[in-house]
Structures are given as structure tokens and as C-alpha cells.
Amino acid sequence: MTIAVFLGALLLAMAIGMPISFALLASGVALMWQLDLFDAQILTQNLVAGADSFPLLAVPFFMLAGEIMNAGGLSRRIVNLALSLVGHVRGGLGYVTIMAGCLLSALSGSAVADAAALTALLLPMMVGAGHSKARASGLIAATGVIGPVIPPSIGLVIFGVAANVSISKLFMAAIVPGLLIGGALWVTWAWLVRSDKIVPPARKSGREIAAAARQASWALLLPVIILVGLRMGVFTPTEAAVVAAVYAFCVAAFVYRELSVRELYAVFVGAAKTSAIVMFLIAAAMVSAWLITVADLPSKVVGLLEPFMQNKTLLMIAIMLLVMIVGTAMDMTPTILILTPILMPIVTAAGIDPVYFGVLFIINNSIGLITPPVGVVLNVVAGVGKMRMDDVTRGVLPFMLAEFAVMFLMVLFPVLVTVPARWLHG
């Protein structure tokens, strides 16, 4: 009954068009009434406490860093470097998209920011070269969702806070899985364009490649600083977000000189608006998380998953399928905040490594950004590319299937995540 009240109130609120943050509050109030615990003061205290977290400061600073990178020319130089390296081969612009997407993921940690930048920069070039607009937009959307996987990742920060798992360990554990997803996209694109008659751009000379690498070197140095700093214990993930924002500003304003005072104001406003939405969503979800704990919903879900508890692989498959279903109807952040307090006790009881689970959980939620009908990244690509949502959805399907295949491969072979994680984190 408790589960039915919580889910019923949440789905009903969403069905009538209520924003997800207010829907979470509504479901929390409904659960409080059902448990005979309603108290406006408790509601307010949990709402305030939900956003009162030092690690969560990483979210607005990483968002600010991403805004600065797009406005200050860092993203464009990354794309130019990838174009100079592989743009001349058959289907080269697709490989440029994947390579640039992986590099941008190590800068911003946001799927929406990466997808918007890649669409604006590369979609016209791919269509001009003769690629199907639907297929090109699908590849860009699928590449964009690598952003929340490869660190620094906003999704990993939110999960780490909600699950009380080391964010540094999550960052290190997600590097190889993110690159594997990029590799799957590379193979899928190669198979799809094997018979296309596309005229690629001319091969860049060694001098042009060196110039592009020199221009992009300042941008490429950022992920190195962050990962080495985290690995050596120089700063925490929250401090890394501040370092990323300050470094991106210095490069954009004083090295590339593409960020004016007027543009900086717009960048800060954009980052503030996005951060406010995410932080209020987190605060609202923490109310539901507290009530989920009080109502002992995890134990009820454990009862439903009892047949799988003795087999970690079957349990992970069941959880991943559940997250896939939820991801078709809900955005990444609320899914993380709602499901984490429910699933973590199950994962702990089954003896599954929480870092390993966290990486796969975030990968699944990231792919959910391109699963119809909600697919936030699909909407972003369709909007920036000025095309129909249906066309982007049709183009993304083969790449989405490839990403899900890699995810389930990691479920069957956990060493793909755990071994590189131990090696990178020490």
C-alpha cells in the first residue's frame, strides 16, 4: 500500500503537468498523510537540508565550467582537433563526433551541454558532407550521453551524495566504461556507413594538425588537472569543480580572449538558472528520500526482488531493466534521487560493490536521456538542429542499442569496471 501511494501520487502529479520537483513534494506529502506523519515543519527542514551539502557545490561549478567552455571557444577547439585527426577518413565526421564527445565529456560532465555544442558545430557539416540528417543527429545524441559518465560527471556527484559513496572512486571507476561506450559507438558508426558514398573533407597537413593540437592544448589540460588532482589527493571533487570553472574562465578570457564581460554575465545567468532547477529538484527529492527510509520501502522492494538476491548477476539485470523502464519516462536527476535510497540497501544486502553499481546505474540513467518518449537529449538535438523529434529518435536507435549492449556486457563481466577502477584509484 505504501509503495502504491508513493508511486500513485508521483505519477498522478506528473500526469497533470506538474514539474517533477513539485511532483516529488506532492508524493512526499501524500506519503506523510498515509503514514500519519504530516508536519509542515518536518517537510521544510528536509527540503532545506536536502540542498545543504558541501559535495553538491560541485554541481553549479561544473555547470558554470561547461557554460564557459562553450562560450569561450574551448569546445570548438576540441572539435577542430578531432576534425584534423580523423575527419578525412570514410565517415570521418562521425568519428570526429565521437572523439570530440569523449573529450568534451572530460570537460563539462553534462549531456545537454555536450549535445548542444556538438549539434551546433557538427550537424551542419555532416549533412553538408552527404550524411543522413536523422542518422547524424542520432549519433550526436548518443555521443552526448557519454557526458554524465566520463568524469567530471554531475550525475556521479549526485549519486555519490545520495548514496554516501566516494565521488573520487566513482570518477576513477567511470573512465574505462565511458571509453567503452565511445568504442561501441565507433564500431556501430563504421558498420552503418560502410557502404555510404560520402566525400570526406581533405586530409589535414601535419602543420595544420599541429596547429589544431596547439590551439586545443589549453582545453585538453583541464581533464588532466582534474583527474591527476583527484588521484593525488590535491583536491576533493567539489574543489575540482571550482578549479574547472576558474581554469576555464582564465583560458577563455585571457588565452583565447573569446569571453567578454557582456558574455560572461549571460554565462553566469545561464549557469545559475540551470543550477537552481537542479538544486531545487535535489532538495525536493531528499524529502521523498527521507520518507522512503521512514516507510521502510527498501525492505518491501527487497521482498519483491528476493528471488534474485542469491545471484548478483540476475539481481543486477533485474535492477538495470527497472531503471531502463523508469528512464523512458523520467529525467536522469530525479531518477537518481528517487531510486538511489530504494536500491542501495538492496545492493548492499546482496554484497554488490557500491562503486560498481553506481557506475552502471549512472550509465543506465545516461542512456535514458535518449530513450523516447521523454529523452531530454533528443529534444535538445532536435531543437538545436531544427528537426523533428521523430527523425532524431529514428536515427538514435542503433546507437542506443549499442550502448545498452555495452552496459549489459559490464553486468555480465563486472571486471570491465572493477579492475580498471582499482588500478586507477589505487
Image (cartoon, rainbow, N blue to C red):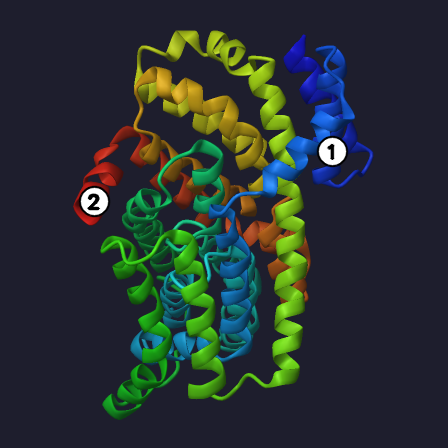
The quadrant where residue 60 appears: bottom right
Residue 63 visible here: yes
Q: Which mark is residue 112?
A: none
Badge 1 crowding class, 10 Å Cα cut-off, few under 14, some 14 to 19, many 20 or more, is: many
Image side of residue 33 versus residue 87, left or right: right
The quadrant where residue 405 appears: top left
Would you say the residues marked 1 and 2 are in contact, meaning their CB atoms lie under 8 Å apart?
Answer: no
Q: Quadrant of the N terminus?
A: top right
Tell me the kind of residue under disc 2: Pro
**Residue marked by disc 2:** 420
For the residues marked 1 and 2, what is the alpha-carbon distance in whole angstroms?
39 Å
Label whose residue precedes the other's in the sequence (1 or 2): 1
Q: Is residue 261 above or below residue 324?
A: below
- Residue 297 in percent (x, y) is at 56, 14
Q: Is residue 107 above or below residue 35?
A: below
Element class at badge 2 = helix
